Image (cartoon, rainbow, N blue to C red):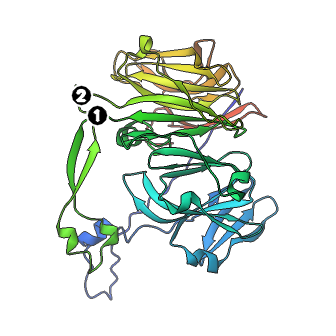
Amino acid sequence: MAVKTVLCFCTFLVISSIVTARSEKKYPISFEDALLHPFSPETFNGTWISSNEYIYEDDSTLYKTNVETDETTVLLNRTLIETFNLTDVLVSADGKWVAIEHDKQSIFRHSRTSLYTIINLETEEQYVLAEGRRIQLIAWAPVGSGLVFVAENDIYYQSEDDRLLNTTHRITTSNKDIFNGVADWVYEEEVLGDTKALWFSPDGSKLVFATMNDVNVRNVTFWKYGDPNRWTNKNLVSSQYVQEVVIKYPKVGTRNPVAYLNYVDLASENFKPVIFKAPTDLVTSDNILGAVSWANNTHFSVTWMERLQTKACTQLCSADVDSACDVVYSYHEDNGWLDIVEPVWVNSTAFLTVLPHDQGGQLGNYRQLSLVQDGHDVPLTSGPSVVTAIRCYDKEDNTVYYSSTVNGDSAKR
């Protein structure tokens, strides 16, 4: 296996007041400047939609560029974009449909609710998703143009044929304290680092999603003083008064959310989820659901941790056999806490990850790129440097790309 390091060169710009000999006075940075970030650099809004195409917005028009042919075409015209209070555009895998996100309302760091309109790029027909209800998450299948979305903590699936018939399939039915396919506050902020908690198989025919049950998690209440990014003369007065925010927040010695995985075969007519629970004999009943990824179209992996995060295990589960999972690797850390990277599967029996390995002498452990197979891990890198991320695995070339610190200098990448 070839191993390549990705070198990243970053330039940091310190922006300050520029005073020339002709300047009459300096401009002090205000409190509003600190809150509203007016000195932020301009960025390019391009987003990759395939291995050779990306989209970007310019002058209220959405363009698509093919980097191989250097051809740029209009994806959505100015008139259509200005019809919506648009915040994002998601293109289906086959390039035939777009989901326009508009009227977004943020909840926490990653979570939000929005309205979505689906547009057929060939016919320009528009479909209002979920009958105009607010949606927490939408995800296109990696193949074709099927999609799943989450509304009021429940998951729905819609194939292309369903869309033309204006129908959807409801996969879950839960109360407001049970989250399906999206993370609750604890998992969003502390575990997954995202609101998304669902994963398509590579061929798009199967779906795995997490459920977080917060029924027995106690509440914490805090005050919020408005949003500085939305300050106007009208709402400045109302921002003087606090908004009371209540979240489910487990403190030491209290109940954590109860999390488990669900599997659904989207190609069948039976959308009843099959439940996969944590191996409590290995990670106790007070556990945490960690990284989830598909090894192939029939097997997915899930990592479970004890609440103390000093012990964990990764299971490989079969989508063809109800709740059939085998432990493929176990982790433990006696001198701290586990920091587990999402497995990158090389084949159905081996995966890449990042694990600590002793570098000998006085150096101690450094996190190295590792290949795990048959319950054993083999370091693919060595030395006094830390592998910070696995960027990509090219199956055709059997090559992995990763980023790391420079030997002996953790400040450099």
Total number of numbered discs in the rendering: 2
Of 350 and 33, nearer the camera is: 350
- Please tell me which residue is depicted at 53% across the width and 26% down the height of the picture: 275
Q: Give the side of residue 12 with respect to residue 156, left or right.
A: left
Q: Position of residue 85 (x, y in %)?
A: 50, 72
Tell me the tag on residue 217. Answer: 1
- Please tell me which residue is depicted at 69% across the width and 45% down the height of the picture: 142
Dot 1 falls on a residue whose secondary structure is: loop
Residue 403 falls in which quadrant of the image? top right
In the image, residue 307 above or below residue 14: above
- Please tell me which residue is depicted at 58% across the width and 29% down the height of the picture: 343
Comparing labels 2 and 1, the label whose residue is closer to the camera: 1
Q: For mark 1, does the 10 Å Cα neighbourhood hold few (<14), some (14 to 19), or many (20 or more) residues?
A: some
Q: Amino acid at mark 2?
A: Thr
Q: Which residue is mark 2?
A: 254
Q: Amino acid at mark 1?
A: Val
Of 293 and 260, nearer the camera is: 260
Q: Give the side of residue 21 with respect to residue 296, left or right.
A: left
Residue 80 falls in which quadrant of the image? bottom right
Tell me the tag on residue 276. Answer: none
Q: Calculate the distance from the C-alpha at mark 2 to the C-alpha at mark 1.
A: 7 Å
Mark 2 near mark 1, Cβ–Cβ under 8 Å?
yes
In the image, residue 353 above or below residue 313: below
Q: Position of residue 65 (x, y in %)?
A: 73, 64
Dot 2 falls on a residue whose secondary structure is: loop
View extreme (right): residue: 69
Q: Position of residue 107 (x, y in %)?
A: 37, 55
